[in-house]
Image (cartoon, rainbow, N blue to C red):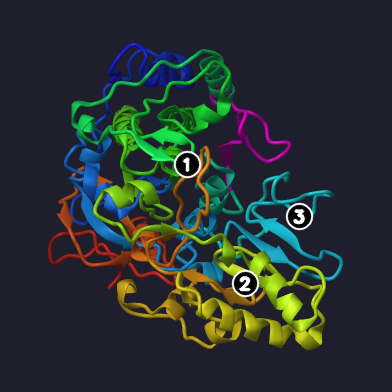
Amino acid sequence: MKVRIAAPLALPIALIAAAFAAPALAQQAAPAAPVAEAAGPRAAPKLIVAISVDQFSADLFAQYRNRFTGGFARLLQGVVFPSGYQSHAATETCPGHSTILTGMRPAHTGIIANTWLDQKAGRADKMVYCAEDERVPGSDHNNYTASDLHLRVPTLGEMMKAAHPATRVVSVAGKDRAAIMMGGHKVDELWFWDGKTFASYAGRAVPPTVARARTAVAELIAKPQGPLPLPGWCAAIARPIQVGNQTLGTGRFERAAGDAKAFRASPAIDSAVLGIAYGLAHDMKLGTGAAPDLLIVGLSATDYVGHANGTQGSEMCIQMNELDLSLETFFDALDGLGVDYEVVLTADHGAHDMTERQREHAMPMETRVDPALSPRTVGAAIGRELGIAGPVLIGGEGDVYVSSDVPAAKRAAVIAAAVKRYSAMPQIAAVPTREQIAATPMPKGPPETWTLLERARASYDPERSGDFLLLLKPRVTPIPAPGPGYVETHGSPWDYDRRVPILFWRKGIAGFEQPLSVETVDIVPTLAATVGLEVNGLDGRCLDLDATAASTCPR
């Protein structure tokens, strides 16, 4: 296995690889066996590798693509769609991941947000986490048992298993919602970082690879981490910026011994996830059976780094460099398995930089949301106006619900008053009601041309969505006051949050770039075609990955 380390205290790729790979591969992987080329039309790949890089926006990809020399450089030799879209309005982690390997928009997956409100009888005002098992007594959106309960549609892995029962599906991620929403209801292995270690569903046996990973990561976290190297091309953007009580922009991921939270928000967690994914692929001999297999990888560090530091300082620059090197190590290791594999890499959503740095970078109109827009604050004013005691509106930027405490006879008046008040506020772009959204046909055509109502329709579910949707204007960050770990975010219907790259690669592919827009829901029909799997009724379409007049899609 080829290992690249920038300095002795840099990201411990060597430790990760040596600890997670089978013992015989701890030093050097065997040379890759040649992949046989089929005569005539190319044979289907034996292994699909689907990678999501959380918060890897199309803007971030464009900014760094000329700096990549490792794993991303390999992918750039394949088929590149720089303008992929998470085309719905709810550009959060869980909805985005639910589209990637289902071929369906959140309106059909049922995953409308990271959390939503359930006001069923006996469960008044319960916030539900998208990957929560509500059947567990005492469960809430902060303390829960992970589950695929809320995902309403099958994933690619389930489709492959239905056609070929021998197919194996492995899903590994830095977040439970990434592993679950891409893995689906039928997985052979599913592992995610739970804040302390790599975990799975209760009762699942721990395979040797994961056991080694747990030990290696625990030992890593127990030691302090020195500053990671700053690539020369990062120096120009390593400038301090004052954000609330923090000075950011020049960080290099120094970490105190025992700080698991800092580990989670650093490049090291991506290497850990990739190491486990490779170790499971090796130990399970993925890609060597009669049926094609699926290896799913969810990389979360970019999202945590972005939320904590923004997208334009030394922190994100180092993260992009380390991720590029970690992907290179991962692909080199997969090469050593001697299987014919196909890669797709995309993201669950985008993001844009923190307000304070945006203002310094020629965007003086950038602003943070006014706390007066809080549904609780607005609801209290409406309550006084209409003579309603108790909470009136519940929610945040996005879905807003009329509290179940509001008398039925006054619900319509509350919604009308809320729409009127919010529509008059200068930071609000639109306040569509659930009736308006439901009456909007599912959008068609290029996603960049969709109206706000159409974007909202793509992530609307009649059982889970709010009574109205609160949509901020562009360049209004929905964080009133920044704090540690949370200075920028995403979730808007605007293209900086919707646009993500979609990259396909396979050994021997004749690459090309298509700058016009496609959608993440197009990934499943595209991959299904490459493995000869017939799929129907999806929101996405097959993307032809053949650069010639021939096609990889069904005729």
Q: What's the magenta bit mostly, secondary-structure-wise? A: loop
- Whether residue 164 is visible to the viewer of this picture, yes or no, is no
Q: Is residue 408 magenta?
A: no
Q: Which residue is mark 2?
A: 465
Residue 502: percent from left, percent from top: 31, 55
The x, y position of residue 121, in whole percent, is 84, 70
82 sits to left or right of 477: left
Q: Quickly name the residue at label 1.
A: 244
Q: Position of residue 48 (x, y in %)?
A: 38, 47
User: 284 left or right of 518?
Assistant: right
SS for tag 2?
Answer: loop
Nearer to us: label 1 or label 3 = 1
Q: Residue at x 37, y 44 (%)?
A: 46
Looking at the picture, which amino acid does disc 3 mark? Glu
Which tag is nearer the camera, tag 1 or tag 2? 1
Question: Is the Cβ of the residue at disc 1 closer than 8 Å to that at disc 2?
Answer: no
Where is the N terminus found, in terms of image quarters?
Answer: top left
Indicate which disc residue 423 carries. Answer: none
- Label 1: how many Cα within 10 Å (few below 14, some 14–19, many 20+): few
Give me the C-alpha separation between circle 1 and circle 3: 37 Å
Which stretch is magenta? Answer: 187-209
- Amino acid type at circle 1 is Gly
Q: Is residue 149 left or right of residue 356?
A: right
Residue beneath the point at 61% across and 28% down: 197
Residue 134's disc is 3
Nearer the observer: mark 2 or 3; the answer is: 2
Disc 2 marks a residue whose amino acid type is Ser
